[in-house]
């Protein structure tokens, strides 16, 4: 009965409203300019909104609200619930407001550089007054890769238009995909890089290779989509993969980082970052891997999860500070079992590594009835390190340390999701590494000399 009466009551209130056509009757806006970040052409932006206020004691009729471009710019609007490039007869009651939503799909053009897009929403009042809200954005052309399967060797560089992957990019069994220094590969939501053949990422300290989502705009003024998880899939190395070599790769904000499932070839990851994913950071199942000078951080599941196989980790920082859910995985999980199936750890070793996180114990091991061939040498760990079966010359991170958990690092901005895992001045990891193992990687991932007192992890402290 209440639902039936409400429209009548509202109609009665509206009938009593009086409207003015006085020349000084104008609207006020919460913003006079709506600015969008750069968006890839053909992709839809985030939606922004602004309020339209009537400060007068009588209602104001808006005869027309229209896009100045008549809809050719790529901007779209919704005015008080009405979609269209032009809407008519909009009422703003006295001392009231309406809401306008705006988004943009930048049209394709011929430029290789971002192209500015300008438009305006024009409000024509019943008294003849016109008012505008300016719209500004930039569109970046790109190469759309839709369901592509590479059947021969290809090299992607940072020259020309950026590449955006849809429906996943598949590297065939007989093909090698090489990503040259400075290349950025963008992935649409849900798209992954699936490797049946070989993958070679050849970044440098000055020009790393980046794999990320395709949202290059912001959710909020302080928060780019690129800092959020689950913006794309991840890298999947299938059983037929002949090998994977990554150097100075930045892989972030995916559904997962890298998944290696019983691959034929070896995995080598050096000077790289795997950060901020909604699943596993690095997942190794019955694989052969070398991971060095690498940061693996903030994963909803384990940052590193190993089932069977062999692996060496040298000067790695594994940090589990996933911010969106308290029920997160471990920084490190090593097991002889996947479910009920045996996958014995043949040899997994950690040298001069720093493994920490939010939990009270960030290292999980599951030997079961098999020998767990796992050992840590000169590492700093957030776990009990007294068992000499597994730990040699290791340091246990504790509450009694000068720094503990997140205070070991330079920057932790959990509002804007900005993390800098370089060591703080008093970090417990300082000077805890062995010079013997540091000679294998005498500089950290940023090229800083480790010297005779190497720090644990992938970053050497420098003032």
Image: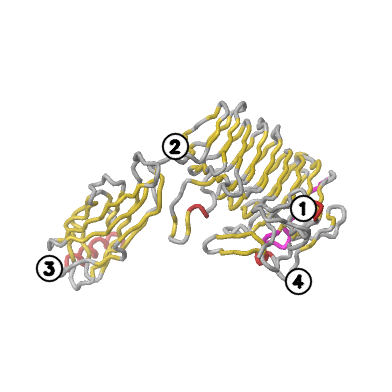
| Residue occupied by mark 1 | 438
Circles 4 and 2, Cβ within 8 Å, touching? The answer is no
Question: In the image, is 63 to the left or to the right of 313?
Answer: left
Region of the chain picked out in magenta, as a range: 356-368
| Dot in front, 2 or 3 | 2
Q: Is residue 399 above or below residue 247?
A: below
* Residue 59 placement (x, y as % from top left): 18, 67
| Residue occupied by mark 4 | 400
Neighbour class for label 1 at 10 Å: few (<14), some, many (≥20)?
many
Name which of mark 4 and mark 1 comes first in the sequence.
Answer: 4
**Disc 2 from disc 1: Cα separation:** 43 Å
Circles 2 and 3, Cβ within 8 Å, touching? The answer is no
Task: Kindly state the secondary structure of the residue where label 1 is placed.
Answer: helix
Name which of mark 4 and mark 2 comes first in the sequence.
Answer: 2
Neighbour class for label 4 at 10 Å: few (<14), some, many (≥20)?
few
In the image shown, does 227 or 38 lie closer to the viewer? 38
**Disc 1 from disc 3: Cα separation:** 78 Å
| Dot in front, 1 or 3 | 1
Q: Residue at x 60, y 31 (%)?
A: 176
Residue 338 visible from this viewpoint: yes
In the image shown, does 56 or 400 lie closer to the viewer? 400
Name which of mark 4 and mark 3 comes first in the sequence.
Answer: 3
**Disc 4 from disc 3: Cα separation:** 72 Å
| Residue occupied by mark 3 | 23
Q: Quadrant of the C terminus?
A: bottom right
| Residue occupied by mark 2 | 144
Circles 2 and 1, Cβ within 8 Å, touching? The answer is no
Task: Kindly state the secondary structure of the residue where label 3 is placed.
Answer: loop
Residue 330 visible from this viewpoint: no
Name the disc covering residue 391, or none.
none
* Residue 60 placement (x, y as % from top left): 18, 65
């Amino acid at each position: 009965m209440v639902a039936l009466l409400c429209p009548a009551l509202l109609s009665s209130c509206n009938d009593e409203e009086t409207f003015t056509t006085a020349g000084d009757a104008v609207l006020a806006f919460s913003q006079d300019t709506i600015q969008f970040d750069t968006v890839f052409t053909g992709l839809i932006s985030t939606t922004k909104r602004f309020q339209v206020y009537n400060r007068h004691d009588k209602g104001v009729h808006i005869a027309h609200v229209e896009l100045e471009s008549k809809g050719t710019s790529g901007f779209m609007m919704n005015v008080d619930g009405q979609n269209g490039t032009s809407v008519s007869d909009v009422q703003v009651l006295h001392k009231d407001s309406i809401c306008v939503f705006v988004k943009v799909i930048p049209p394709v053009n011929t430029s290789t550089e971002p192209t500015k897009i300008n438009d305006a929403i024009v409000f024509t009042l019943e008294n003849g007054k016109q008012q505008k809200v300016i719209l500004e954005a930039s569109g970046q052309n790109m190469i759309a890769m839709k369901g592509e399967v590479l059947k021969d060797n290809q090299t992607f560089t940072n020259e020309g238009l950026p590449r955006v992957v849809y429906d996943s990019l598949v590297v065939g069994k007989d093909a090698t995909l090489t990503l040259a220094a400075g290349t950025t590969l963008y992935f649409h939501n849900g798209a992954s890089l699936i490797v049946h053949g070989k993958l070679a990422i050849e970044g440098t300290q000055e020009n790393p290779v980046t794999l990320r989502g395709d949202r290059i705009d912001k959710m909020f003024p302080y928060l780019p989509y690129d800092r959020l998880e689950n913006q794309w899939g991840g890298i999947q190395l299938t059983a037929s993969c002949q090998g994977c070599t990554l150097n100075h790769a930045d892989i972030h904000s995916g559904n997962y980082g890298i998944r290696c499932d019983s691959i034929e070839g070896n995995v080598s990851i050096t000077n790289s970052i795997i950060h901020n994913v909604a699943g596993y950071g690095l997942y190794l199942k019955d694989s052969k891997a070398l991971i060095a000078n690498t940061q693996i951080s903030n994963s909803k599941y384990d940052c590193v999860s190993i089932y069977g196989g062999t692996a060496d980790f040298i000067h790695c920082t594994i940090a589990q500070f996933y911010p969106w859910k308290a029920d997160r995985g471990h920084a490190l999980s090593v097991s002889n079992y996947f479910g009920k199936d045996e996958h014995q750890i043949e040899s997994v070793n950690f040298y001069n590594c720093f493994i920490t996180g939010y939990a009270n114990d960030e290292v999980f091991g599951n030997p079961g009835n098999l020998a767990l061939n796992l050992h840590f040498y000169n590492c700093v760990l957030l776990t009990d390190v007294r068992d000499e079966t597994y730990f040699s010359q290791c340091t246990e991170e504790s509450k009694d340390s000068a720094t503990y958990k997140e205070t070991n690092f330079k920057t932790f901005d959990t509002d804007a999701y900005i993390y800098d895992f370089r060591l703080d001045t008093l970090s417990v990891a300082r000077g805890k590494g062995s010079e013997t193992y540091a000679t294998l990687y005498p500089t950290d991932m940023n090229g800083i000399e480790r010297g005779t007192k190497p720090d644990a992890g992938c970053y050497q402290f420098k003032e």
